[in-house]
Image: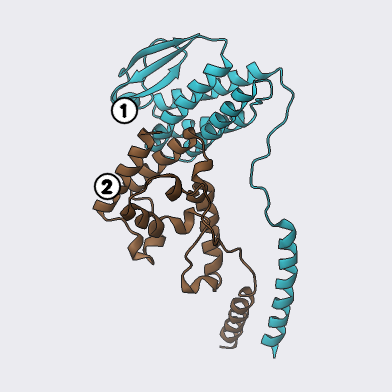
Chain colours: A cyan, B brown
């Protein structure tokens, strides 16, 4: 008897749910783009770079926790970047770079150090490509370690090589490949 | 003793009740033009392997097991499929840029190498989805080649 009552209840509940669902169908999963006024774009590039360098330094120091925190911050600063002031072609390129970089930064924010370093490799390429479009007020050095994963690059504000892929295990492995001004 | 009976009845009622809560099913009759298999020249053995081992959670079409409509299994499946597709959807492969493809291919290779994919909870039931050493090597080589040719 009571089971029958509960069944009835459940059925009416299902109907209500279904109606609710119809309104919500095809919900857009895309992250809504932050539309802020431009002008501050240079500052935003510098924030991205500063988060990236914090991440790099944490990896140099073999500090997983700090790297994860820097990764989370980088996700935020990447998403805050506004592409509006760029040409259409560059906008597409930048959006693509940012989408990719966000994914790697997210993984870095929740992984162990080996994984963080793997993602850091692709992230470094993304950030290098980003800077190639946006430019930066500082001089950067693209450094390269031939040993890690068939050769891997990263960016640094200093000429001196401190390897983020090996940390203390092989701190000095690598050389300056290019100066970015 | 009475309390046990009451709890048993409540559980039974709850179990029956949740069967009526609907879930979204991940099924499609058509294969979109952007599908991984259509835009890449994938050898047949690798096609089969990907279909069996990956496509249930990483495409728009899931081959559901018989118990898929029983709650709470259906929720569990729905959740996994949603998460899997958000990370990688083979059905929409060609809508990705080369940069994104390279990132995804890198992840595919790393996850298979590390034995993280397919998930243990999946291969436990779908024995045929597990990768033998040989199969893993074939798929990894293929994906690496694809990445190098981007």
Along the line of sight, which residue is nearer the eye, B30 or B9? B30
The residue labelled by disc 2 is: B137
Between residue B132 and residue A42, name the one nearer to us. Answer: B132
Instruction: Return the residue nearer the eye: B149 or A93.
Output: B149
- Residue A53 can be seen in this image: no
Element type where label 1 sits in the image: helix
Q: Is residue A43 left or right of residue A99?
A: right
On residue A112, the disc is none
Q: How many marks?
A: 2
Quadrant location, the N terminus of chain A: bottom right
Residue for point 59% across, 81% down: B12
- Label 1: how many residues lie within 10 Å, few (<14), some (14-19) or many (20+)? some
Task: Report the chain holding disc 2.
Answer: B
Q: Chain of mark 1?
A: A
Q: Which residue is mark 1?
A: A148
- From the top left corner, tell me how far across and down residue B17 is, in percent: 64, 77
Distance from Cα at disc 2 to Cα at disc 1: 21 Å
Report x, y in % for residue A141: 44, 13
- Which residue does the image show at 64% across and 69% down from the upper left? B22
In the image, residue B144 above or below residue B77 = above
Query: Do the residues indicated by labels 2 and 1 lie within the same chain of the protein?
Result: no
Residue sitting farthest toward the bottom: A1
- Where residue B119 sits, quadrant-wise, is bottom left
Query: Quick check: B34 left or right of B6?
Result: left
What is the secondary structure assignment of the residue under circle 2?
helix
Query: Of tags 2 and 1, which is closer to the observer?
Result: 2
Residue lying at 51% horizontally and 70% vertically, measured from the top left: B68
In this picture, residue A145 sits left or right of residue A101: left
Query: Could you say where residue A140 lies in the image, as x and y percent from the top left?
Result: 48, 12
């Amino acid at each position: 008897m009571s089971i029958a009552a509960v069944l009835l209840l459940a059925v009416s509940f299902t109907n209500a749910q279904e109606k609710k669902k119809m309104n919500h169908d095809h919900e857009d999963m895309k992250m809504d783009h932050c539309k802020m006024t431009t002008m501050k774009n240079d500052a935003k590039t510098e924030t991205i770079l500063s988060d990236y360098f914090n991440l790099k330094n944490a990896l140099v120091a073999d500090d997983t926790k700090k790297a994860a925190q820097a990764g989370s911050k980088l996700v935020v600063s990447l998403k805050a970047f506004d592409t509006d002031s760029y040409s259409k072609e560059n906008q597409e390129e930048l959006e693509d770079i940012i989408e990719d970089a966000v994914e790697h930064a997210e993984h870095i924010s929740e992984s162990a150090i080996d994984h963080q370093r793997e993602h850091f490799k692709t992230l470094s390429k993304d950030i290098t490509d980003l800077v190639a479009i946006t430019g930066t007020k500082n001089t950067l050095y693209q450094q390269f370690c031939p040993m890690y994963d068939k050769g891997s690059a990263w960016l640094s504000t200093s000429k001196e090589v401190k390897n983020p892929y090996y940390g203390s295990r092989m701190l000095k492995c690598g050389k300056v490949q290019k100066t970015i001004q | 003793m009475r309390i046990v009976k009451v709890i048993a009845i409540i559980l039974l009622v709850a179990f029956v009740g949740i069967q009526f809560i609907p879930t979204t099913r991940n099924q499609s009759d058509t294969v979109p033009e952007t599908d991984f298999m259509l835009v890449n020249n994938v050898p047949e053995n690798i096609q089969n392997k990907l279909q069996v081992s990956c496509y249930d959670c990483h495409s728009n079409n899931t081959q559901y097991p018989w118990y898929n409509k029983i709650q709470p299994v259906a929720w569990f499946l729905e959740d996994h499929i949603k998460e899997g597709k958000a990370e990688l959807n083979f059905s929409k492969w060609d809508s990705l840029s080369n940069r994104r493809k390279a990132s995804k291919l890198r992840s595919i290779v790393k996850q298979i190498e590390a034995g993280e994919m397919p998930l243990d909870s999946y291969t436990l039931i779908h024995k045929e989805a597990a990768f033998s050493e040989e199969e893993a090597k074939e798929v990894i080589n293929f994906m690496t080649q694809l990445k190098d040719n981007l």
